Amino acid sequence: MNPVATETPLPPEPLCASDDIAERGRAFVWDVLEYGRPARAFVLRFDGALRGYLNRCVHVPTEMDWQEGEFLDMDKRWILCSIHGAAYEPEDGRCVGGPCGRGRLTPVRVAEEAGQVYWYPSRDIRPVPFDEAPVPDRPLTGS
Ligand code: FES
């Protein structure tokens, strides 16, 4: 018998209230560790469903939002990178235009239950340990 290494799935991590993420509105952005290195992720609502990705453009590995949590273009149709204008399909993160080629955003599994939004850590994308978490400096909503 060839044993297959199994990994105990990490429990989902609460993010925010479902009502905090409006249809095609501002995304919720949070800190994660990807392969142990700091990164950011975001979740937005598109056609009623939550979509989560790492906040990292395929063209150049940099954050994409115009302002904190603002990822969509003016027509609220595409995720648009603020640096050189790469456009991504919100439903699957696929590049649909601009310098991202055949790339795709890195998905982060998200879900909501009983009015609460969660994300699911993976082998590669983990929560920031509590004692390493930066002090929040930006509110979730409001202007
Ligand atoms: S860094 Fe995103 S399009 Fe160039």
Image: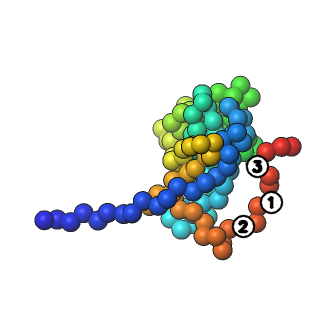
The quarter holding residue 87 reads top right
SS for dot 1: loop
Secondary structure of residue under mark 2: loop
Report which residue position mark 3 lands on.
140
Residue at 60% in and 30% down:
48
Q: Residue 27: which numbered mark, if any?
A: none
Structural distance between the alpha carbons of marks 2 and 3? 15 Å
**Residue at x-position 52% and y-position 55%:** 12
Identify the mark at residue 134; answer none if there is no mark. Answer: 2
Determine whether, in the image, residue 83 is placed left or right of residue 99. right
- The image shows residue 126, relative to residue 120, as above or below, that is below
Mark yes or no: residue 70 visible.
Answer: yes
Alpha carbon of mark 2 to alpha carbon of mark 1: how far? 8 Å
Q: Residue furthest bottom?
A: 131
Using the image, determine if residue 143 lies above or below residue 77.
below
Q: Are marks 2 and 3 in contact (CB under 8 Å)?
A: no
The residue lying at 86 percent from left, 43 percent from top is 143
Disc 2 vs disc 1: Cβ atoms closer than 8 Å? yes
Q: Which residue is mark 1?
A: 137
Can see residue 98? Answer: no
Q: Amino acid at mark 3?
A: Leu
Residue furthest to the right in view is 143
Give the residue at x 57% y 56%: 13
- Of mark 2 and mark 3, the one earlier in the sequence is 2
What is the crowding at mark 3: few (fewer than 14 residues within 10 Å), some, or many (at least 20)?
Answer: some
Residue furthest top as drawn: 75
